[in-house]
Image: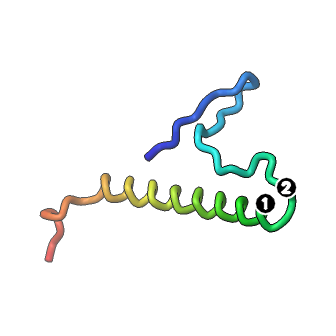
């Protein structure tokens, strides 16, 4: 799944998805939100890579047993 992006006025592209760290006060809530955002992004990237590998790989009937 490719994340949709929008182009800002300055030309920078930004994902449409947000992880909820805007305006969170400093402290444990902010730390938890940032850690969760990073882990979620990493998991999404891994799933996207796996999905692409599965799509481009051999079909099950092409395996040599």
Mark seen at residue 25: 2
- The span from disc 2 to disc 1 (Cα, nearest Å) is 6 Å
29 left or right of 63? right
- Circle count: 2
What is the residue that sits farthest to the bottom in this orientation? 65
5 left or right of 8? left
Does residue 10 lie above or below 1 as drawn?
above
Give the mark nearer the N terminus: 2 vs 1: 2
Asked if labels 1 and 2 touch by Cβ distance under 8 angstroms, the answer is: yes
Q: Which is nearer the eye, 28 or 39?
A: 28
Q: Residues within 10 Å of mark 2 (few under 14, many from 20)?
A: few
11 left or right of 51? right
- Which residue corresponds to mark 1? 30
Q: Which is nearer the eye, 50 or 25?
A: 25
Does residue 13 lie above or below 2 as drawn?
above
Does residue 13 lie above or below 43 as drawn?
above
Residue 30 image-quadrant placement: bottom right
């Amino acid at each position: 799944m490719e994340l949709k992006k929008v182009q800002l006025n300055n030309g920078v592209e930004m994902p449409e998805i947000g992880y909820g760290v805007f305006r969170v006060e400093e402290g444990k809530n902010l730390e938890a939100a940032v850690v969760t955002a990073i882990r979620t992004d990493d998991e999404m990237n891994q799933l996207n890579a796996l999905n692409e590998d599965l799509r481009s790989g051999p079909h099950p009937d092409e395996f040599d047993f």
